[in-house]
Image: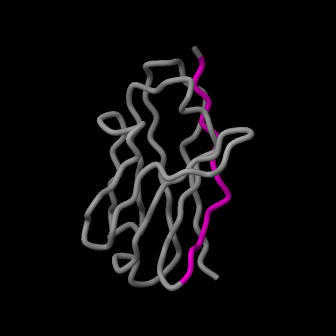
């Protein structure tokens, strides 16, 4: 079982920034696609951003221009830099490692106050 662990959530005012990090204990981390997803209360989990093993990124329309996903393969880490945060960004953010299976972290809470 691959262990995926998120960190960096918290409470921030609207317009502020947060940086989420995710580490995975897996060899050959660089060969795996990674992604950030979020789930707000009463809503389905949705894609926020993904980054492939070759570095190709994809963003949800709602976060384009505000969020940046990146990876550091030497540290088995993927980061999500979140700027210009809005109250509607409030959710539990989950990291996913995708190989033959999907491996999810436990989630980290992000709360944006107005």
Q: Does 97 appear above or below 10?
A: below
Identify the residue at horizontal 55%, vertical 50% (top origin).
46
Which SS does the magenta portion mostly show?
A: strand
Residue 94 at x, y percent in the picture: 58, 54
Q: Does 61 appear above or below 23?
A: above
Queried whether the magenta region covers residue 102, the answer comes back as: yes
Extreme top residue here?
114
Q: How many labels does the image show?
A: 0
Q: In this view, does 70 lie to the left or right of 89?
A: left
Identify the residue at horizontal 39%, vertical 59% (top origin).
50
Colour pattern? one colour
Q: In the rendered image, which quarter contains the C terminus?
A: top right
Residue 74 at x, y percent in the picture: 32, 70
What residue span does the magenta drawing correspond to? 101-113
Identify the residue at horizontal 35%, vertical 80% (top origin).
31
Q: Does 102 appear above or below 94?
A: below
Q: Nearer the viewer, residue 48 or 9?
A: 48
Q: Is residue 75 left or right of residue 102?
A: left
Q: Does 96 appear above or below 70?
A: below
Q: In the rendered image, which quarter contains the N terminus?
A: bottom right
Residue 111 at x, y percent in the picture: 62, 30
**Which quadrant of the view contains residue 81?**
top left
């Amino acid at each position: 079982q691959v262990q995926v662990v998120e960190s960096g959530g918290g409470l921030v005012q609207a317009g502020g920034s947060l940086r989420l990090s995710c580490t995975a204990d897996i060899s050959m981390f660089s060969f795996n696609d990674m992604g950030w997803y979020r789930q707000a209360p009463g809503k389905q989990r949705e894609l926020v951003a993904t980054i492939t093993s070759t570095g190709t990124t994809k963003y949800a329309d709602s976060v384009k221009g505000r969020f940046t996903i990146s990876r550091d393969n030497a540290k088995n880490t993927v980061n999500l830099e979140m700027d210009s945060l809005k109250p509607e960004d409030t959710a539990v953010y989950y990291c996913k490692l995708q190989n033959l299976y999907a491996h999810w972290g436990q989630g980290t809470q992000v709360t944006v106050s107005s």
